[in-house]
């Protein structure tokens, strides 16, 4: 039997899919293209209504053109589960293999989800360190679809990281909705220390950091542990205190600014990215202009800008939507334009510098693509067999897309 997994949403889902893949492999199934597969697993995302709509359309089109088995798993709200129940074959609760069944399986799975080794490929090894979330930001569906925050035991994580390094992965990417509150026996800075101590040449990245929990200890860990990439993803969501309060994000813009200042003072070369939501219920022109102001002032290296999408079960769902879709688009565009300017400026300032780059893949035009520690794309000429290596690249050009460079032969 052949199976195919379609993954939507975040890197945590990506990592979950890798475990689902090895679960199937161990049972004697073969991973295949979508066309050839007899079983299709949809690992779903519910963050925005548009994501779940897309998933529903996809399942319907699979079912219309063939009679293949469709299994739905991942982040799905009860309401969507019920609606889609009539046209999927199975719903598998995420991360609970004991309840995953198919007529082809003889025995019930005894192992816990994280005991199933992920089937990894590529240069980066994604590694979930927590599941769920306790923060209940008012717009967000995650606590309702993934439950309470749980930290995996540190021992298990360190073993998994060690195994990934041994297999040749050059980047260990720790994942959690709020990794800063990790508490699996040791705290997050100690976990970074332990992973930093694993022998080998690799980078450590982590997402996501909640500003309320980014302590000075974590900042010191990023600064002092050599393998921790000097990169921080720090979602601000809004630049207005009133909106932050309504979002149930328990920090002020003043505090956000101070954290960024501290981070930059300690680690001047660090690159910082963020998430912003535009068009939250009640976001006035004045509130939005505060977001514009803070966003411009900070000058991010990268940002993900989302138009607010009302999600059932969340507390913001009950708030009246006041911003039209066209207006959300307009606000999104304004932030995007500022982002382009700040990225251009930052990337230009790197011209002439030599940066360590992890080489990830070859583009169609034959150029190699790599990432800097700050998670910036670099394009340069080189042989394909360099993929997976670290190289020093001299930056020759910076644009709002990324960097161009040359391998430094010295
Ligand atoms: N735990 C992480 C990421 C959660 S989801 C964090 O706290 O940042 C990733 C991003 O999706 C969020 O940062 C937010 O910007 C966006 N998002 C979440 N819910 C949303 C919604 N209902 N509408 C629009 N964007 C949303
Ligand atoms: Fe959602 Fe907030 Fe938790 Fe992030 S921290 S997953 S935005 S509830």
Image: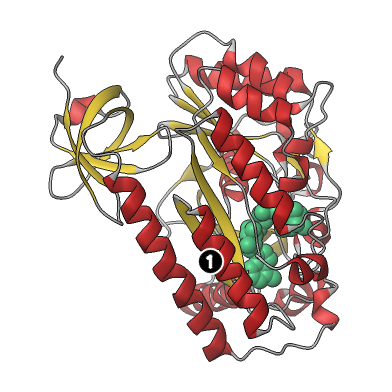
Q: Looking at the picture, how far across and down is residue 320, in whole percent? A: 79, 88
Judged from the image, the secondary structure of the residue bearing numbered disc 1 is strand
Local packing at callout 1 (Cα closer than 10 Å; few below 14, some 14-19, many 20+) is some
Is residue 31 visible in the rendered structure shown here?
yes
Q: Residue at x 48, y 42 (%)?
A: 30
Is residue 104 visible in the rendered structure shown here?
no
Quadrant location of the C terminus in the rendered image: top left
The image's colour scheme reads secondary structure
Q: Residue at x 64, y 23 (%)?
A: 221
Judging depth in this view, the residue of 309 and 95 nearest the camera is 309
Q: Is residue 359 left or right of residue 373?
A: left
Judging depth in this view, the residue of 271 and 26 nearest the camera is 271
**Relative to residue 190, is residue 271 depicted above or below?**
below
The residue identified by callout 1 is 305
Q: Is residue 300 left or right of residue 150?
A: left
**Dividing the image into four equal quarters, which quarter contains ligand 1?**
bottom right
Q: Quadrant of residue 176?
A: top right
Q: Quadrant of residue 141?
A: bottom right
Q: Is residue 221 left or right of residue 255?
A: left
**Relative to residue 58, is residue 45 depicted above or below?**
above
Q: Residue at x 53, y 42 (%)?
A: 29
**Relative to residue 97, is residue 303 depicted above or below?**
below
Q: Is residue 363 left or right of residue 139?
A: left
Q: Looking at the picture, how far across and down is residue 186, in whole percent? A: 81, 21
Q: Looking at the picture, how far across and down is residue 300, in whole percent? A: 48, 52
């Amino acid at each position: 039997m052949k199976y195919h997994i379609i993954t939507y949403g975040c890197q945590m889902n990506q990592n979950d899919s890798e475990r689902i893949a090895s679960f199937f492999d161990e049972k004697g199934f073969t991973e295949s293209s979508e066309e050839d597969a007899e079983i299709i697993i949809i690992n779903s995302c519910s963050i925005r209504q548009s994501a779940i709509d897309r998933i529903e359309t996809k399942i319907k089109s699979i079912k219309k053109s063939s009679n293949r088995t469709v299994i739905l798993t991942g982040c799905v709200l009860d309401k969507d589960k019920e609606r889609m129940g009539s046209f999927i074959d199975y719903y598998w609760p995420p991360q609970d293999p004991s309840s995953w069944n198919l007529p082809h399986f003889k025995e019930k799975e005894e192992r816990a989800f994280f005991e199933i080794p992920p089937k990894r490929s590529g240069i980066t090894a994604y590694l979930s360190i927590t599941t769920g979330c306790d923060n209940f930001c008012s717009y967000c569906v995650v606590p309702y679809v993934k439950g309470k925050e749980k930290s995996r035991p540190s021992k298990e994580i360190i073993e998994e990281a060690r195994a990934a390094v041994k297999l040749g992965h050059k980047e260990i990417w720790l994942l959690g909705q709020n990794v800063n509150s990790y508490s699996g026996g040791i705290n997050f800075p100690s976990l970074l220390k332990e992973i930093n101590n694993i022998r080998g040449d690799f980078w450590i990245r982590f997402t996501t950091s909640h500003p309320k929990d980014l302590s000075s200890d974590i900042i010191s860990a990023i600064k002092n542990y050599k393998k921790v990439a000097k990169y921080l993803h720090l979602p601000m969501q809004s630049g207005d205190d009133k909106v932050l309060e309504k979002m149930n994000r328990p920090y002020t813009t003043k505090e956000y600014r101070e954290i960024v200042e501290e981070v930059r003072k300690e680690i001047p070369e660090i690159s910082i990215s963020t998430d912003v939501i535009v068009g939250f219920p009640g976001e006035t022109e004045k509130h939005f202009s505060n977001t514009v102001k803070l966003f411009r002032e900070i000058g991010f290296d990268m940002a993900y800008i989302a138009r607010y999408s009302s999600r059932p079960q969340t507390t913001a769902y009950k708030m009246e939507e006041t911003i039209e879709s066209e207006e959300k688009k307009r606000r999104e565009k304004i932030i995007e334009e500022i982002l382009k300017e700040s990225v251009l400026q930052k990337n230009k300032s790197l011209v002439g510098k030599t940066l360590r780059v992890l080489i990830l893949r070859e583009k169609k035009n034959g150029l190699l693509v790599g990432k800097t520690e700050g998670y910036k794309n670099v394009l340069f000429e080189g042989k394909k067999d360099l993929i997976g290596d670290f190289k020093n690249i001299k930056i020759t050009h910076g644009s709002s897309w990324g960097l161009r460079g040359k391998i430094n032969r010295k």
